[in-house]
Image (tube, coloured by chain):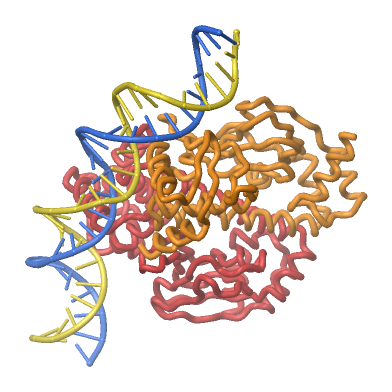
Chain colours: A red, B orange, C blue, D yellow
DNA sequence: GTTTTTCTGTGAGGTGCTTCACAAACCTGT
DNA sequence: ACAGGTTTGTGAAGCACCTCACAGAAAAAC
């Protein structure tokens, strides 16, 4: 059973889709599963990066921490997505921490197994490159946003993006972001303070554009947020 | 002559080093050279990305522009370096503009030539991946720095980095950054205002840590800047 | 050599966001 | 059911950085 799950996960992932049965089986034979509790750390900045991970169940956040304790969340990795490929591929240390946001199972592939496999399968190479390109685009966009958009624009963009990824249409109308995301965590994703996020959310709630609950945001007026974003882009 | 130069360029580049003679020749036969004047635009955000470029002579800057006209410089591409690989590989549009900083010659390889070539050469695949990993690391670091470091720390870091890349030891002591970089351009590299950069540079000049000239910075006290950076990292 | 453009230097004033500080609401474990 | 942690809501104070506004210097253009 577990094996079948693994295979389904592998074959549906962005990284490994389109690979044939035999290849998947060989790759599968290289993996082990690791279980993590909520808030457990998988690796930290500076660790040697000798493995690739795929999320089987749960969520992993990729965060960088400054010496004084501030954090920025660079990415949240969902079920079926892979991560940790950068350090694996270039052989350098990890540049960020990986922490389980809830009880999580990851599947682990060692470099010594993966690299030779990669060298034998050009098609897989192409997919890896696609993934890397995607990463570059995402992080570049973060640089851009940090430089151009004020807080309200960045927050609007993040909410719309989260709604897109995890949104659930509500019977009473509106789109709930189906993720337990405290405002603190939201703030970290945007490189800003929790208080600032809260104040902006309050403004929008008073406008009737969103609804708030502990760890939850429901977007009632997507158009309005879209407009905030566009206005912010024009300064 | 031109052909020999091209070959030398190709074979020494980060991207293509280690490839054998025959491969280089085949790749070479796919390239054409394009000449750009100072400030000429090679491509802009939104263009279809159907080619890969290598700088033969001169410098190209990669910048993103906001609707209102603000700019952030993401990267400066030097002689012997390649760029434009992201859009080429994933088939999406360019996400930034490429502008010649001086009279520049770039060599151009079309996607329809490069991709099939890539698929036939696993070794080249690996090198491309290395390059992509490097890009991810650089941009991630920019996100981190923007979030954690105040202006003085970011500027110190940039100057030290530039000195490392383009530094020339001066007879009278100090390290000159051998690049014509107006303070405006420096500011754009850090996502900040020209005035702020200037004021910080003045402070350091008054401390005797740097010397300034039009488009030039000479670092007299590298240690001091290093210390500023470390202090900034601790908040 | 004179004009024009680019780059630098500097002050004043405004503000977006941070930090600090605390209260209330909410969930969780035993 | 009560205690202790976590998340939210909010105000006040401060400051890092931005924008605006020039003036002079240096290079480029003519």
Position of D12 compared to A171: left or right? left
Q: Residue at x 54, y 72 (%)?
A: A46
> Image quadrant of residue B131?
bottom right
- Please identify the quadrant where the N terminus of chain A is shown: bottom right
Position of B215 compared to B78: left or right? left
State the image coordinates of residue A140 (x, y, percent, origin top left): 52, 48
Q: Residue at x 83, y 49 (%)?
A: B11
State the image coordinates of residue D9 (x, y, percent, origin top left): 15, 57
Q: In this rendering, is residue D4 above or below B128?
A: below
User: Residue reaching furthest front?
Assistant: B172
Q: In this rendering, is residue C2 above or below B127?
A: above
> Image quadrant of residue B137?
bottom right
Position of B14 compared to A168: left or right? right
State the image coordinates of residue B143 (x, y, percent, origin top left): 46, 53
State the image coordinates of residue C27 (x, y, percent, origin top left): 23, 74
Q: Is residue A25 visible?
A: no
Taking depth in this image into account, of B219 and A140 the one nearest to the observer is B219
Q: Residue at x 21, y 51 (%)?
A: A199
Q: Residue at x 59, y 51 (%)?
A: B173
Position of B76 compared to B25: left or right? left
- Please identify the quadrant where the C terminus of chain A is shown: top left
> Tag count in the figure?
0
Taking depth in this image into account, of A140 and B156 the one nearest to the observer is B156
Taking depth in this image into account, of A170 and A222 the one nearest to the observer is A222
Q: Is residue A160 visible?
A: yes
């Amino acid at each position: 059973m577990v094996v079948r799950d693994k295979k389904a996960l592998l074959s549906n992932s962005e990284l490994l889709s389109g690979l044939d049965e035999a290849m998947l089986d060989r790759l599968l034979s290289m993996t082990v599963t690791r279980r993590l509790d909520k808030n457990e750390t998988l690796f930290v900045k500076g660790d040697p990066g000798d493995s690739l991970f795929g999320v089987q169940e749960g969520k992993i956040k990729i965060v960088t921490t400054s010496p004084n304790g501030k954090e920025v969340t660079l990415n949240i990795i969902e079920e079926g997505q892979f991560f940790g490929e950068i350090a694996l591929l270039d052989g350098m240390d990890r540049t960020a921490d990986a922490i389980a946001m809830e009880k999580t199972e990851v599947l682990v592939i060692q470099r010594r197994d993966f690299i030779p496999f990669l060298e034998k399968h050009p098609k897989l190479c192409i997919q890896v490159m696609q993934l890397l390109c995607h990463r570059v685009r995402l992080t570049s966009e973060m640089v851009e946003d940090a430089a151009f958009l004020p807080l309200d624009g960045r927050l609007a963009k993040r909410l719309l993006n989260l709604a897109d990824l995890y949104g659930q249409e509500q019977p009473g109308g509106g789109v709930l972001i189906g993720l337990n995301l405290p405002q603190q965590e939201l703030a970290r994703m945007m490189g800003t303070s929790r208080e600032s996020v809260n104040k902006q959310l309050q403004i929008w709630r008073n406008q009737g554009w969103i609804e708030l609950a502990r760890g939850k945001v429901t977007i009632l007026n997507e158009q309005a947020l879209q407009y905030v974003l566009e206005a912010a882009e024009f300064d």
